[in-house]
Image (tube, rainbow, N blue to C red):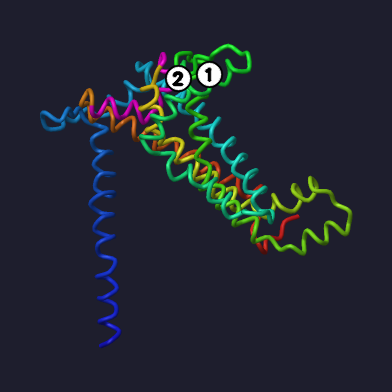
Amino acid sequence: MMGGESRYLGLAYVAPYIAGLFVFTAIPFVASLYLSFTDYNLMRPPRWAGIDNYVELFTRDRTFRKSLTVTLLYVFMTVPLKLAFALFIAYILNYRLKFINLFRTAYYVPSILGGSIAVAVLWRYIFADAGLVNMLITAFGGEPVNWFGDPSNALFTITLLRLWQFGSAMVIFLAALQSIDKTLYEAAAIDGAGKWHTFFHITLPLITPVIFFNLIMQMVQAFQEFNGPYVITEGGPLKSTYLLPLYIYEEAFKKFDMGYASAIAWVLFVIIMVLTLIAFWSSRHWVYYAGDKRS
């Protein structure tokens, strides 16, 4: 009797989560797939259009091709740099330094604030024509840089905002570094191995599972980036920062073309899924778990 009551009590505890998952995730997920095959502008019922939206995307929509190119460039530029920078800071913070806990907290704070609208606005003012960065450049005798008005600089500036939010990846890397058995470093030191040799032959192989986890998480987040480009540049200039999430937003909530926006969203979903599957496939060649026996 008690076992039955415990089972129902457990179901009661998880019921709110299951209901939320069903109502706010599963139903919208399926509905968006259906809407991607319709002509739907919120003012009239959806009208079945078959694959017309997808044909339009891949054959006639130059804006989509431009946005896709910018998004892929942004992801492939941001994710490796962010992971490398997060690992570098984590490696430094792994040493026993004075006030180390204060430094760890200070480096983590940007990841909490980085996705906010306020920080995006602040970033826009820092890199403005008369902003702090150009003031420092002119103070050292350089010429001011048009960070947001020049297409060749705008995406890089948006990327810097993403790099600044490295705290979450850094904390995970730091936990992985602290879990490495210190006797391995002692044995390497006895054999005369230097720091570089130790890092590339002991540290990196042992934290590859964490690198893989951070790679997947950061890639998915980068593909979904919206706040920074929308607040700072609104996709400009010349759509040089016009990421796919901005395109989805404008099609859905400015042009009210929900069918077309859903089609773009599903293309984005498929791209993320394919790249994630490729990452999982490649992981067998470079990710090493405890107990692995590889030649």
Identify residue type, mark 2.
Ala
Q: Identify the image quadrant of the N terminus.
A: bottom left
Q: Quadrant of residue 31?
A: top left
Q: Is residue 197 left or right of residue 78?
A: right
Give the number of the disc on residue 134: 1
- For mark 2, what is the residue? 128
Rate crowding at label 1 as few (under 14), some (14 to 19) or many (20 or more) other CA atoms within 10 Å: many
Residue 185 magenta: no
List x then y, in percent, for residue 6.
29, 80
Residue 158 vertical placement versus 108 (above, below) = above
Label 2 crowd (10 A; few <14 / some 14-19 / many >=20): many
Splitting the image into 4 quarters, where does residue 149 fall?
Answer: top left
SS under mark 1: helix
- Say which of 29 and 115 sits in front: 115
Residue sitting at x 52%, y 16%: 152
Would residue 105 be found to the left or right of residue 248 on screen?
right
Is-magenta flag for residue 247? Answer: yes
Residue 281, percent from left and from top: 57, 46
Query: Which one is in front, 57 or 109?
Result: 109
Q: Residue at x 37, y 18 (%)?
A: 63
